[in-house]
């Protein structure tokens, strides 16, 4: 290996770091994050629910004929009801105990109604992919599906169920009480959007992490200039495991390999402080020792004001790393240099 300083101290990293989210990634994040899309379409969503309808089928017709995509309408409801992935799965796996009659009997405007489910419960998991509400799918125009209708019925009127046990489980599914009442809808929805749902904040955090990892991967593909290496997101290294019997391979953000040579790359860009970097620091020593004993290498891309607030954690990572760089094109060029030296292409 050349004598270039690849193992940076926290002080050296902080002088080279971007600290705050780079503008080119902010644009990507805005395109993928659901928050801006929900705020942008909030008035359309309110307009649909403001129409006075006699039945749920009448509401479904309005959704289908509106300019707001059906899956985006559903995403609004999921956020407002704080009905995340765990609750969706519970609704599906425990469907018969939550809704023992396989229908929803509910009270709406002092009248009793009954909604008979079309497809719930479904085989396998009930998740965002099946509902068409993952990031990319939300940008596509889709007709209202039978499954989406079932979930919309639950999200609108679950808390109005005439079965007390059902109503208790679905207590946050209450927005149906305001259908056809524009003033009350406005107040209810605006208040709910003051706080950011755990669902959207979680998806936003995941989105940010995925963007930085993909950016680093793409940068290496474009600038490493070694045609024989393989660059993989979420990969693992032969022989590196959580357990002694090697039955749980350790996952890394990016793995670069060529023949029997491997480099693991962990990427962390945190603008706000959280415990992710502490977890990475706690794993750093054992990972480094395993990786070095096998002749492999590990590198870290570390940046963001939140990470630099955890100086002790960063110090541990820098100590147990073969290469540590900040998040900038100049720094990623240094990572490329490190990889070229290791793979013998320098």
Image (cartoon, helix red, strand yellow):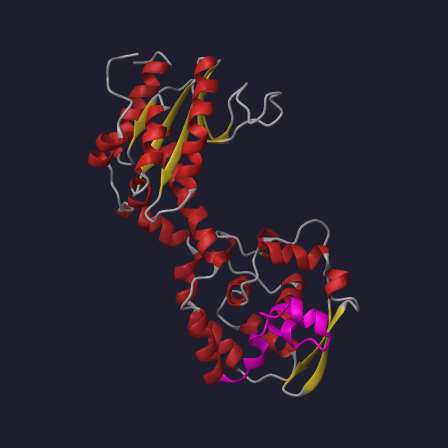
Please state, as top left, top right, bottom left or bottom right, where the N terminus lies in the image: top left
Q: Indicate whether 56 appears above or below 203.
A: below
Residue positioned 44% across, 55% down in the render:
201
Direction from residue 220 to residue 74 in the image, left or right: right
Residue 136 image point, x, y percent: 48, 51
Direction from residue 282 to residue 222 in the image, left or right: left
Q: Is residue 74 magenta?
A: no
Q: Is residue 169 magenta?
A: yes
Residue lying at the far bottom of the rendered structure: 110
Tell which of 256 and 95 is nearer to you: 95
Residue lying at the far front of the rendered structure: 312
Residue positioned 50% across, 29% down in the render:
235
Is residue 230 visible in this depiction of the protein? no
Tell which of 195 and 127 is nearer to you: 195
Residue positioned 53% across, 77% down in the render:
49
Please state, as top left, top right, bottom left or bottom right, where the C terminus lies in the image: top left
Direction from residue 193 to residue 338 in the image, left or right: left
The secondary structure that most of the magenta stretch takes on is: helix
Which quarter of the figure has residue 115?
bottom right
Residue 152 image point, x, y percent: 61, 68
Residue positioned 39% across, 46% down in the render:
274
Q: Indicate whether 253 appears above or below 39.
A: above
Residue 327 image point, x, y percent: 29, 36
- First to last magenta residue range: 154-182
Tell which of 9 and 143 is nearer to you: 9
Residue lying at the far left of the rendered structure: 15
Tell which of 225 and 334 is nearer to you: 334
Direction from residue 113 to residue 269 in the image, left or right: left
Q: Number of marks in the image?
A: 0
Is residue 59 visible in this depiction of the protein? yes
Residue 91 image point, x, y percent: 68, 60
């Amino acid at each position: 290996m050349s004598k270039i300083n690849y193992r940076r101290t926290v002080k050296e990293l902080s002088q080279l770091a971007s600290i705050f989210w780079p503008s080119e990634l902010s644009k990507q994040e805005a395109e993928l994050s659901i928050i801006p899309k929900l705020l942008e379409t909030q008035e359309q969503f309110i307009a649909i629910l403001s129409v006075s309808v006699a039945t749920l089928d009448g509401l479904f017709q309005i959704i289908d004929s509106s300019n707001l995509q059906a899956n985006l309408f559903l995403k609004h409801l999921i956020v407002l009801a704080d009905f995340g992935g765990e609750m969706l799965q519970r609704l599906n796996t425990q469907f018969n105990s939550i809704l023992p009659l396989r229908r929803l009997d509910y009270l709406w405007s002092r009248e009793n109604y009954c909604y008979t489910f079309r497809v719930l419960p479904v085989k396998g998991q009930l998740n965002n992919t099946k509902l068409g509400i993952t990031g990319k799918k939300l940008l596509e125009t889709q007709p209202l599906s039978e499954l989406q209708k079932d979930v919309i019925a639950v999200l609108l009127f679950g808390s109005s169920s005439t079965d007390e046990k059902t109503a208790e489980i679905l207590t946050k599914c209450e927005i149906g009480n305001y259908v056809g009442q524009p003033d009350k809808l406005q107040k209810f929805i605006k208040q709910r959007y003051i706080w950011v749902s755990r669902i959207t904040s979680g998806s936003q955090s995941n989105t940010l992490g995925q963007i930085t990892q993909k950016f680093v991967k793409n940068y290496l593909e474009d600038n490493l200039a070694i045609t024989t290496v393989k660059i993989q997101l979420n990969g693992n290294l032969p022989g590196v495991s959580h357990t002694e019997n090697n039955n749980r391979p350790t996952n890394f953000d990016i793995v670069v390999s060529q023949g029997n040579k491997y480099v693991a790359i962990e990427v962390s860009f945190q603008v706000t402080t959280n415990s992710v970097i502490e977890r990475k620091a706690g794993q750093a020593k054992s990972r480094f020792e395993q990786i070095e004993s096998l002749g492999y290498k590990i590198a870290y891309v570390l940046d963001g004001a939140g990470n630099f607030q955890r100086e002790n954690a960063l110090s541990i990572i820098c100590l147990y790393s073969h290469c540590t760089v900040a998040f900038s094109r100049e720094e990623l060029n240094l990572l490329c240099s490190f990889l070229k030296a290791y793979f013998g292409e320098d």
